[in-house]
């Protein structure tokens, strides 16, 4: 005696599912095996079949007004393959070796564009012109995602392009050959992209090293020249002014000269009950024109609390002040309003 059984178990492999279903429905399956053993066999076969994870290879069909999404990841190269020769590529955030800015390194092959992000996250867009006369334009959005979500290969199919097996090959043989070519292309692209990044880094390191060496030599030269001239100083007249709210501004009675630079110390003391805030200090010549100067003070904030003093140094070029006996120091508040003015008498 035999009995027909039906199963609700589903398989990804269609031929195997049909074969098993026909076997179970036939009279060749003896009832003595029992329903429990049958279900166990079906479950074991289902568990043994490979799970289909997200494929790192995608095929997209793009028309003139469509935009394809290409997911990339740092440390990987993604190959975008086109049905016609690639003529031109335009990327919105292309890496620039000279400035070190940009998120994507691109390389063009005969029918391929290789994309490698060099930052952990980012987004950009890409236009690719293909065809003998660059008659086709494909549009893409590039996004940087985690490695397990990135695509390794994106095959682009135009509106008039048909896919299928290679002539003389079965579909399985064609797929296997395509996978082999993809793996080799990805390997080469990753190696070339790594070389590009390494060369760019070496060039940047070389330029930075040369610039640092030149700057150090210039500093050494200027320091030696200053030592030859010696350390000098000039006496100034007494200069002190009282600003509103109990604030006084005082200049030292000497200017230290080292090389072609002059150094003048100032002190701002707050005897008032409120914080004194100023916007900037301005050194001017006799005609009221600003003199180029560096202001170096004990703290960066231009605030002097009650009972506190702020000390700073004004550094200016000795030969750039015109009539040196007519220098003035102006303390400016919000909106460049003048709070106090002191004469620098040399």
Image (cartoon, grey):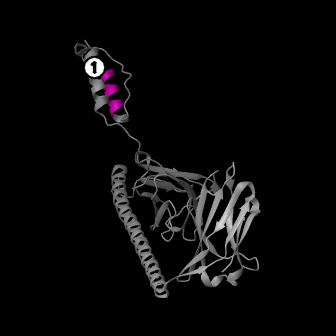
Q: Is residue 235 above or below residue 298?
A: below
Task: Say what secondary structure mark 1 lies in.
Answer: helix
Q: Which residue is mark 1?
A: 38
Give the residues drawn in magenta, as a range.
16-26
> Looking at the image, how many numbered discs can be counted on the residues?
1
Q: Position of residue 316 (x, y in %)?
A: 61, 77
Would you place residue 291 above or below residue 162 in this image? below
Q: Position of residue 283 (x, y in %)?
A: 68, 73
User: 216 or 62, which lies in front?
Assistant: 216
Q: Left of 39 or right of it: where is 94? A: right
At x 58%, y 53%, the residue is 67
Instruction: Residue 229: tell me if it is visible.
Output: yes
Q: Relative to 246, is 53 on the left or the right?
A: left
> Where on the picture, by quarter, is residue 336?
bottom right
Most distant residue in the left direction:
32
Task: Confirm whether the magenta stretch covers residue 18.
Answer: yes
Q: Quadrant of residue 77?
A: bottom left
């Amino acid at each position: 005696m035999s009995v027909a059984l039906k199963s609700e178990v589903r398989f990804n492999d269609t031929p195997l599912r049909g074969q098993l279903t026909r076997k179970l429905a036939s009279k060749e399956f003896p009832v003595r095996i029992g329903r429990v053993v049958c279900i166990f066999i079906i479950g074991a076969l289902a568990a043994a079949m490979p799970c289909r994870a997200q494929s790192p290879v995608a095929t997209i069909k793009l028309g003139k007004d469509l935009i394809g999404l290409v997911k990339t990841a740092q440390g990987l190269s993604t190959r975008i393959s086109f049905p016609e020769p690639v003529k031109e590529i335009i990327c919105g955030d292309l890496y620039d070796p000279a400035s070190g800015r940009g998120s994507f390194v691109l390389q063009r092959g005969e029918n391929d564009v290789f994309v490698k992000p060099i930052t952990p996250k980012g987004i950009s867009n890409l236009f690719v012109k293909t065809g003998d006369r660059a008659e086709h334009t494909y549009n893409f959005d590039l996004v940087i995602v985690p490695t397990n979500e990135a695509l390794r290969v994106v095959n682009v199919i135009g509106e008039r392009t048909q896919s299928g097996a290679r002539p003389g090959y079965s579909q399985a043989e064609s797929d296997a050959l395509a996978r082999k070519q993809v793996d080799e292309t990805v390997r080469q692209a990753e190696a070339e992209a790594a070389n590009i990044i390494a060369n760019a880094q070496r060039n940047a390191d070389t330029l930075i090293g040369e610039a640092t060496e030149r700057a150090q030599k210039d500093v050494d030269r200027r320091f030696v020249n200053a030592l030859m001239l010696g350390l000098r100083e000039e006496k100034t007249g007494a200069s002190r002014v009282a600003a509103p709210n109990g604030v006084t501004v005082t200049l030292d009675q000497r200017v230290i000269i080292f090389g072609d630079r002059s150094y003048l110390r100032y002190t701002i003391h707050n005897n008032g009950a409120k914080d004194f805030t100023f916007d900037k200090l301005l050194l001017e010549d006799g005609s009221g024109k600003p003199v180029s100067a560096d202001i170096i003070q004990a703290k960066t904030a231009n605030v002097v609390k009650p009972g506190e003093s702020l000390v700073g140094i004004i550094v200016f070029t000795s030969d750039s002040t015109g009539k040196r006996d007519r220098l003035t120091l102006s303390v400016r508040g919000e909106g460049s309003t003048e709070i106090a003015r002191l004469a620098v008498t040399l």
